[in-house]
Image: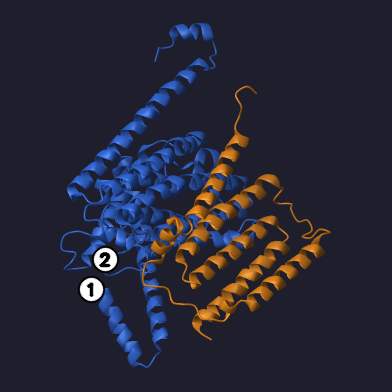
Chain colours: A orange, B blue
């Protein structure tokens, strides 16, 4: 086993463990903090895949924005100090079954995919960020997807402003 | 050849000579580099305590520490001893793990920034190709540390302070990221080493407005005055670190001071040419001197702003960000991107001059728009002003 494989196993175990603690933690804030650990583990996995840009973007977006937003939402809506309800409701069986089914399906699909056993090609010497940027803005690659995502985010932004806006007449 | 790389090469040869595997040698050298770099940064933090206290004293027309050692230079060590000897109090009702982790996060997220700042042409921690975004990501993690500290303390003032601080940091991150994109466009790279190397003309002369926006939003990110609402002593005592004592408070304090100096180093690297200066090609170690001199100058500017301006109100602080700084940064980003493409093949002097003029024009337009808006708002405020005795006051009030 190489060093990278050992690191991968440790990080993957930490990510999964933190993910499990997200759903089993008694305190909602603790659950949110475990979610941060889990998301950070995913960022480390990106680093192991040589995807530095994705790793940093993961930290900026998921930890810097989404996790903070989740923590704010919990603090503003619940009685944080006295919050220790049950972690499961009556639908936990369905949830578990769905999770197992999803895992099984993904496992089955990846077993049948030939790419799973072939070694990855080493990246070219060119800067990966440059390649990513050019791929995102090249018309014959991902420009349309990129623009659609941008328009979707813009629509969400405008929508939230419309909801929060104080109308002059009321 | 500079001494640091010579030592590293000598150590590498020595360790390989002992028959260690290549990966182990690499691991030991990287670990040593991390230890040396963080030690240097922490020593800088100790010096920062003295500099900060001396400079604030001069701004307030005092002498500052002057009893221990020449110019009071030994004073910070006495401060550290005091912090170390203080009783470490854990208040009842705190959430132990986040309470103890957050001071570590506060200091570590600042220390880790030194890993991407190039100290000399040849000595740099890590030349990652997403250096700029890495800085933003570490800022995001430090926000998390603050919210953890504020919540874990089980103290209302701490939580209020954390809320304010996080609202401020999340908001001012937007113009900061946008202004960081401008050196990236000019250098066509996100690595800080490349940005420093491509500054044949310092970027502060090419895009002064971007430098100014970066400085203002960094000041807010640091939580320094006029953006120090998170520790408004008269309202919420000390903000998110109110319940911390001893060295845990010391870590927040050292983190804050070192962060200010680190912002200075970042500003120097992005806009003031980093390590570049005369004779740096012959003697690479001079780069550290130039970088630290520029960083200290920016640190001094940050302190100058902090100790000269009164604290902003929270709605003013937020509307200044969202209604002025963010649109300005976005407009500037578009203008710079367009100009950079249009002027790509012109003479460097034409390029720099037109960029400079474009920056001044954008800044002037923004200021005149803000002034017009201010006149309108002031008029609205004057109409609705609640007066104790309206009839007399209108007659007596000056018509300003």
- Where residue B101 sits: x, y (%)? 56, 62
Image height check: is A71 above or below B105?
A: above
Which of the two residues, B334 or A59, is positioned nearer the viewer here?
A: B334
| Badge 1: residue crowd in 10 Å (few <14, some 14–19, many ≥20) | some
Can residue B291 be seen in the rendering of this structure? yes
Q: Distance between the residues labelled 2 and 1?
A: 9 Å
Picture quarter with the C terminus of chain B: top left
Secondary structure under tag 2 reads loop
Asked if residue B110 lies left or right of residue B64, the reply is right
Question: Residue at the location (36% across, 33% down)?
Answer: B366
Can residue B56 be seen in the rendering of this structure? no
Disc 2 or 1, which lies upstream in sequence?
1
Asked if residue A22 lies left or right of residue B137, the reply is right
For the image shown, how many numbered marks are present on the structure? 2
- Where residue B27 sits: x, y (%)? 42, 80
- Where residue B46 sits: x, y (%)? 37, 60
* Residue B120 tag number: 2
Circles 2 and 1: CB atoms closer than 8 Å = yes
Image height check: is B86 above or below B212?
A: below
Which of the two residues, B53 or B393, is positioned nearer the viewer here?
A: B393
């Amino acid at each position: 086993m190489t060093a990278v494989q050992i690191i991968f196993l440790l990080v993957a175990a930490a990510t999964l463990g933190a993910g499990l603690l997200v759903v089993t933690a008694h305190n909602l804030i603790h659950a949110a903090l475990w979610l941060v650990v889990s998301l950070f583990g995913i960022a480390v996995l990106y680093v192991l895949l040589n995807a530095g840009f994705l790793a940093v973007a993961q930290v900026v977006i998921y930890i810097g924005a989404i996790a903070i937003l989740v923590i704010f939402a919990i603090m503003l809506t619940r009685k944080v100090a006295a919050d220790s309800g049950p972690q499961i409701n009556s639908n936990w069986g369905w949830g578990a079954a769905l999770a197992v089914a999803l895992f099984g399906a993904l496992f089955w699909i990846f077993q049948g995919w030939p790419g799973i056993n072939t070694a990855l090609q080493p990246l070219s010497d060119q800067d990966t960020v440059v390649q990513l940027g050019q791929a995102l803005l090249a018309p014959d690659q991902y420009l349309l997807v990129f623009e659609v995502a941008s328009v979707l985010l813009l629509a969400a932004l405008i929508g939230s402003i419309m909801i929060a806006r104080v109308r002059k007449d009321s | 050849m500079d001494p640091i790389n010579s030592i590293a090469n000598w150590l590498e040869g020595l360790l390989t000579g002992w028959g260690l595997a290549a990966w182990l040698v690499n691991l030991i050298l990287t670990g040593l580099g991390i230890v040396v770099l963080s030690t240097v940064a922490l020593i800088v933090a100790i010096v920062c305590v003295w500099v900060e206290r001396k400079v604030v004293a001069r701004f307030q027309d005092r002498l500052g520490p002057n009893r221990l050692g020449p110019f009071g230079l030994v004073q910070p060590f006495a401060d550290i001893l005091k912090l170390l000897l203080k009783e470490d109090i854990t208040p009842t009702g705190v959430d132990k793990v986040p309470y103890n982790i957050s001071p570590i996060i506060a200091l570590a997220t600042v220390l880790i920034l030194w890993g991407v700042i190039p100290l000399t042409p040849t000595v740099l921690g890590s030349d990652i190709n997403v250096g700029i975004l890495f800085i933003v990501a570490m800022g995001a993690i430090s926000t998390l540390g603050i919210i953890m500290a504020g919540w874990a303390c089980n103290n209302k003032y701490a939580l209020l302070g954390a809320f304010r601080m996080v609202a401020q940091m999340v908001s001012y991150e937007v113009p900061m990221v946008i202004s960081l994109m401008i050196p990236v466009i000019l250098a066509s790279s996100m690595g800080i080493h490349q940005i420093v190397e491509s500054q044949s003309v310092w970027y502060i002369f090419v895009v002064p407005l971007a430098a100014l926006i970066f400085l203002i939003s960094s000041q807010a990110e640091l939580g320094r005055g006029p953006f120090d609402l998170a520790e408004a002593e008269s309202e919420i005592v000390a903000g998110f670190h109110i319940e911390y004592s001893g060295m845990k408070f010391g870590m927040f304090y050292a983190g804050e001071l070192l962060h200010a100096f680190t912002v200075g180093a970042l500003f120097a690297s992005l806009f003031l040419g980093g390590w570049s200066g005369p004779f740096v090609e012959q003697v690479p170690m001079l780069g550290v001197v130039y970088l630290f001199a520029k960083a200290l100058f920016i640190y001094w500017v940050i302190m100058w702003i902090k100790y000269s301006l009164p604290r902003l109100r929270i709605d003013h602080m937020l509307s200044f960000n969202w209604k002025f700084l963010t649109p300005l940064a976005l407009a500037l980003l578009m203008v710079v991107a367009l100009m950079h493409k249009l002027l790509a093949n012109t003479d460097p002097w034409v390029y720099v001059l037109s960029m400079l003029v474009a920056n001044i024009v954008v800044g002037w337009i923004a200021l005149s728009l803000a002034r017009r808006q201010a006149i309108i708002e002031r008029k609205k405020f004057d109409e609705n002003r609640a007066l104790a005795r309206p009839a007399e006051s209108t007659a007596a009030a000056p018509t300003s």
